[in-house]
Amino acid sequence: MARISLKDIAKAAGVSVTTVSFVINNKAREKRISEQVVEKVNKLIREKNFTPNTIARGLRTGKSTSLGLIVEDIGNHFFGNVAKTIEMTAYKKGYKVLYSSTDNSEKKARELLDMMKNQQVDGYIITPTKGMKSAIAQLKKEKKPFVLFDRYFPDLETNYVVLDNFKGAYDMTEFLIGKGYRKIAFVTILNGMNQMQNRKQGFKKAISDKGKGKVEGLVLELPYEITAEGNLDRLNEFMESHPDVDALFFATNYLGILGIQYTLRKQLSIPDDIALVSFDDHDLFRLQKIRITVVAQPIEKMAAEAIDILMKLMAGEPSVLIQKTISPEILIRDSA
Amino acid sequence: MARISLKDIAKAAGVSVTTVSFVINNKAREKRISEQVVEKVNKLIREKNFTPNTIARGLRTGKSTSLGLIVEDIGNHFFGNVAKTIEMTAYKKGYKVLYSSTDNSEKKARELLDMMKNQQVDGYIITPTKGMKSAIAQLKKEKKPFVLFDRYFPDLETNYVVLDNFKGAYDMTEFLIGKGYRKIAFVTILNGMNQMQNRKQGFKKAISDKGKGKVEGLVLELPYEITAEGNLDRLNEFMESHPDVDALFFATNYLGILGIQYTLRKQLSIPDDIALVSFDDHDLFRLQKIRITVVAQPIEKMAAEAIDILMKLMAGEPSVLIQKTISPEILIRDSA
DNA sequence: TATTTATACTAAATCGTTTTAGCAAATTTT
DNA sequence: AAAATTTGCTAAAACGATTTAGTATAAATA
């Protein structure tokens, strides 16, 4: 029992495939197909449980009703939840989503984009890696609908949705200074993307603006690695050579988790021995005896914004750029 | 500058599209295309950076080189990481993956499956909901390659990869009994799927086998809800009416998280006031002062197994059923 | 009554591949 | 030298829809 096609419906109804096609595409009125024929066709469609072959339709129309979602790591709490919101919204609008994690690999990122282009996805939501810049520029040149997420290229005008990373880092640093911490270390990763640079700059600016020369700001930049093992050692070393650091500020959730690992291993008590704060919220930060103060990203809001913009772009709407910078929330808890 | 097609390459090379098609599909030898022509065509393909249109190819061949992945919630640690392993492996084999979360909604689950069928994905990895049984039976009837994940239907013979849930619950319960706990509550959800039933049965069996009539086993079944709010209250009520429970065993990671919330709210200290153990590992369980003892699912192994089986099925291999039951690991830590 | 216009539909082209069937020239076998 | 085989390629159909350009009949207008 092979799949049933337009042709089968047409034959059964005794009309042409054209007519059936008009009916399924709601063009019956416009194309003046009689009520009776419309009824008959619809009845058959229901009876035979027919749905048009998306692939054939895609070939003819050039549209696939699918979206490409490229994130850093779908297994990460932040991106997993982004993916969830995006898929739910896309689904409601009749779109499928193809996802993939880059794991910050340049090669994979570019291949992915090619794969998706080839698959003729109708739009893209992309968490870019450093090396994707030219591929993104190309996408722009081809006037494909896309929105960058979480980070963007300052020297490439695109649509994007990002957190106000500078502000998040600045405000948190100011908060730490206000709490009396005097030697604050900012632990970040080197991925060459502007969201990390902005966080670092926000930290430094707050130190110089608000520290009044009395607060020392240190920066530890770790390489991006999936296995945290090496990084825990690096953090250890760093702390050994700077034993008087009184507050640690981690630039991402997995770095914050690393920080917690570190304090557990060293049996440091928070916030008495050392303050610990982090970017991104996480169950782990929320559900501790000493709850961790964080710069939270409103994940759902950001994801909803991104998919909303993409839908607008795909509908051929504004050719002006849409760039959203979402305000972070500082959630003050017990750890600093 | 429109997309470049087979035809363009053919024209440029002065050969037929057939020839070019043979070359891209590595049938040059078989179809006796001369070395020179192959060279020339390949050169042009490289120069013009041509890749065949997947949609057209899909229409003709009926294959889409894509996979459908249906999970319960991609934002959940367990499924997010499953998705990651699956996508990575699929990608290496040249497959794209369409994913979606059901959130345990029957309606969405079935619509999803229709959508994916329609999209002509070549294979499926599915975490089924209760109501999907007939849809899965249909999939089987159509001889589509698929493997169920995390749970299956005992009265429907299919390929699957699941944890040995009975054993996990049994062993953990036995461990708790051995530690001297005498009133153990098993907190689970009602989703009507066998993985949860098996966990409950494992718990009960261990109580009766190993409790020697001296250990009481209670079961609290919560409805599946995305917002945990209501469930926290229900847990509270339950504990108020059973104040002498000395160990809590949670059946999933998000229930375990709920449990931690509960102990924090009640300021209970673990394991002195109460023991707390859970199914599934999680950062939150690992990185506490009092680390939580868990029944861990080897996520990567399970996902790798699933995608491996699917690949074999898609290659048209064994028509015998492949059913893998993976052993859980009991990670004994500090919480019991 | 002849002409125009509206109605209700359809034939055929098209999207970009794969694949079957076959053709002409070159080579080998009789 | 004729027949058979091999070599190297191509024409055209097919996949299943959408869409353009019509066509035949009925109704309205002149």
Image (spheres, coloured by chain):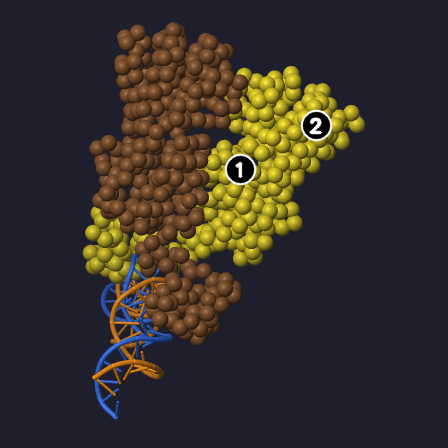
Chain colours: A brown, B yellow, C blue, D orange
The C terminus of chain B - image quarter: top right
Task: Write down the quadrant of residue D23 in the picture.
Answer: bottom left
Q: Nearer the viewer, residue B120 or A264?
A: A264
* Residue position marked by numbered label 2 in the rendering: B241
User: In what element is the residue under mark 1?
Assistant: loop
B70 vs A307, left or right, is right
For residue B174, which quarter of the picture?
top right
Q: Identify whether A138 is placed above or below A242.
A: below
Chain of the residue on which disc 1 is drawn: B
Front-most of residues B280 and B261: B261
Residue B1 at what x, y percent from top left?
20, 52
Foreground disc of the pair 1, 2: 2
Residue under the image location 35 percent in, 71 percent down: A32
Residue at horizontal 47 percent and vertical 13 percent from the top: A270
Name above or below for residue B148 compared with residue A280.
below
C-alpha span from label 1 to label 2: 25 Å
Q: Could you say whether the residue bearing mark 2 is in a helix, strand or loop?
A: helix
**Where does the image place residue B59, in percent across and percent down from the top left?**
38, 58
Please say if the residues under marks 1 and 2 sit with CB atoms less than 8 Å apart: no
Q: Is residue B168 visible?
A: no
Q: Residues within 10 Å of mark 1 (few under 14, many from 20)?
A: few
> Is any atom of residue B76 visible in this view?
yes
Q: Which tag, 1 or 2, sits closer to the chain's start?
A: 1
Q: Find residue B15 and report its horizontal and vertical position in percent.
A: 23, 60
Q: Looking at this view, is B315 or A159 the one in front?
A: A159
Q: Nearer the viewer, residue A168 or B204?
A: A168
Check disc 1 and report the residue beneath it: B226
Give me the residue at 38% from left, 33% from top. Answer: A72
In which image quadrant can residue A239 be found? top left
Residue B332: x and y, percent?
61, 22
Give amino acid for label 2. Ser
